[in-house]
Amino acid sequence: MNHKPVQPTGPYHDFWIFAEGSRAYSDYHDLLSRKNAPVRVPDDVLRYFHDCFSWVPTLNPAVSNQKKSGLGFNYYGPTIVNRQGAENWERILFHLKELYQGAPDLLHLTGPWTTDPSTQSSTAGYYEVLEIKKTWLITVLTTLHEFAQLASLNSHFVLHLGI
């Protein structure tokens, strides 16, 4: 059975960039309800890149000890990418951006596993096909790459707000 490709929609992951020292890593609550982040990435797209983004050293500002480090982005909460992880993320984003330069104008990417609730079976389903314009994806990857470059210089940090 063929399924029509879908365009990814929300929920979204928001990415902000701030100069180091301009705000505390834990000072993000005023941004939670805003919809004007410099970069908004649909959840399905961020999940598509989950494996390679999980190689990025990050900080979790939601825990009481702001030194709590990990790898990858918090799905539901905030994540900080500072100099510690930015160099690696910059390299990953650069290569992803270059890879997708050779893609067709309209991309079809493997999306989430979807089941039909009427079958009441977790095995009867299919992977959604995400339909994404190459120009949009390259713009997102380019902007995130620029954010990572600034953070790798220790002059800025990237704040990711999960869904």
Image (cartoon, rainbow, N blue to C red):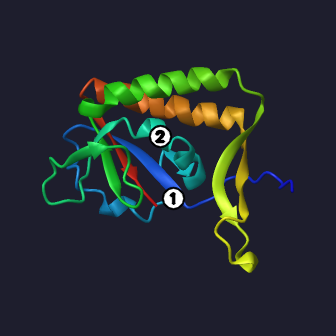
Q: Residue at x 70, y 20 (%)?
A: 102
Residue at the spot of label 2: 51
Query: Is residue 88 visible in the rendered structure shown here?
Result: yes
Please indicate whether residue 93 sits to the left or right of residue 98 in the image.
left
Secondary structure at numbered mark 2: helix
Q: Specify the amino acid type for callout 2.
A: Asp
Please indicate whether residue 44 sits to the left or right of residue 16 in the image.
right
Single out the mark in the foreground, 2 or 1. 2
Secondary structure at numbered mark 1: loop
Label 1 packing within 10 angstroms: few (<14), some (14-19), many (20+): few
State the residue lying farthest toward the right: 1
Instruction: Choose the circle earlier in sequence order: 2 or 1.
Output: 1
Q: Residue at x 75, y 79 (%)?
A: 118
Q: Residue at x 27, y 36 (%)?
A: 82
Quarter of the figure with residue 101: top right
Quarter of the figure with residue 16: top left
Image position, residue 54 (x, y; %): 40, 40
Res. 109 mark: none
Q: Specify the amino acid type for callout 1.
A: Lys
Q: Closer to the camera, 28 or 129? A: 129
Q: Residue at x 40, y 26 (%)?
A: 90
Res. 35 mark: 1
Q: How many marks?
A: 2
Q: Closer to the camera, 33 or 4? A: 4
Image position, residue 11 (x, y; %): 55, 61
Query: Is residue 36 visible in the rendered structure shown here?
Result: no
**Residue 54 vertical placement versus 95 (above, below):** below
Please indicate whether residue 92 sits to the left or right of residue 70 in the image.
right
User: Which quarter shows the N terminus?
Assistant: bottom right
Q: CA distance from mark 2 to mark 1?
A: 26 Å
Residues at discs 2 and 1 in contact (Cβ within 8 Å)? no
Image position, residue 2 (x, y; %): 86, 53
